[in-house]
Image: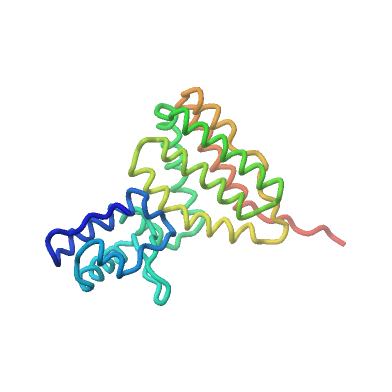
Amino acid sequence: MALASARRPALVDEVIAGLRGEITSGRWPVGSRIPPEPALIERLGVARGTLREAVRALAHAGLLQVRQGDGTYVRATSELSGALQRLDSELSDVLEVRQALDAQAARLAALRITPDRLSVLGELLARRAAAWERRDQDAWIEADHAFHQAVAAASGNTLLGDLYTGLGPALRRSMAAHWAEPGFDGADPRGHEDLLVALRGGHADRAALSATANIDATTHWHTAPTPAPPAR
């Protein structure tokens, strides 16, 4: 861990900056447990009260989550992402916001994406297709979301990526709840191949249209009335 010792004791802001740096750099990934209190006190060279105040501040901001008796975990990579994760939104609301984000992310990614990121997107679509073949709901949802998150990252816009990260948990929870109904079939076996083709070709408008069409299809699929059972 690359934490630097705090040279001036009892400076909570300095400790907050150090802890935030570990989170935003990815050295402490989302979902991971941060080092125990004694180890952090030794590395930072600060008093226990100073460390605890800094942790409380980051927990209040949504970056950390303190679990009594278990430890402290990374909840989000930014204050914005943490705030969004605390929202309990309807799936329809999330999809409407996601539609705007997906279109702009795809448009920018078509202009800025690198070969390495294109390769990652191809791998994620392969994972998505394999999960559908296995009828693995959790893996299908995770691969689908990871694809969209990767497109947002490829846009080169950090704020857009943070917004998408923040919406992720609410979106996955809502989708999982919907697909928990009897008869889950992994939705559409097709992925986002058209979008990937547009990104590879650098076609910004085509990429945006493809992203919008994907969300339109998802919205229709989620809101379509359930067919009545056949008459006996």
The residue that appears at 14% across and 59% down in the rendered structure is: 7
The single residue placed furthest to the left in the displayed view is: 8
Give the number of callouts: 0
Q: How far from the left and from the top, in percent, is residue 121?
A: 53, 36
Q: Is residue 90 left or right of residue 18?
A: right
Q: Is residue 12 above or below residue 135?
A: below
Q: Position of residue 46 (x, y in %)?
A: 19, 67
Q: Is residue 16 left or right of residue 202?
A: left
User: Split into 4 quadrants, where in the image is the N terminus?
Assistant: bottom left
x and y percentages locating residue 106 in the rendered image: 45, 34
Asked which quadrant contains residue 204, the reply is: top left
Query: Is 178 above or below relative to 97?
Result: below
Percent x, y of residue 105: 42, 37
Its colouring scheme is rainbow
Q: Nearer the viewer, residue 218 or 69?
A: 69
Instruction: Write the residue at 24% across / 56% down.
Output: 18
The C terminus, quarter of image = bottom right
Which of these two is toward me, 108 or 21?
Answer: 21
Q: Nearer the viewer, residue 107 or 226?
A: 107
Query: In the image as oriented, which residue stretches furthest toward the right?
Result: 232
Q: Residue at x 58, y 30 (%)?
A: 194
Q: Is residue 177 left or right of residue 183?
A: left
Closer to the camera, 38 or 50? 38
Q: In the image, is residue 84 above or below residue 150?
A: below
Q: Is residue 150 above or below residue 169?
A: above
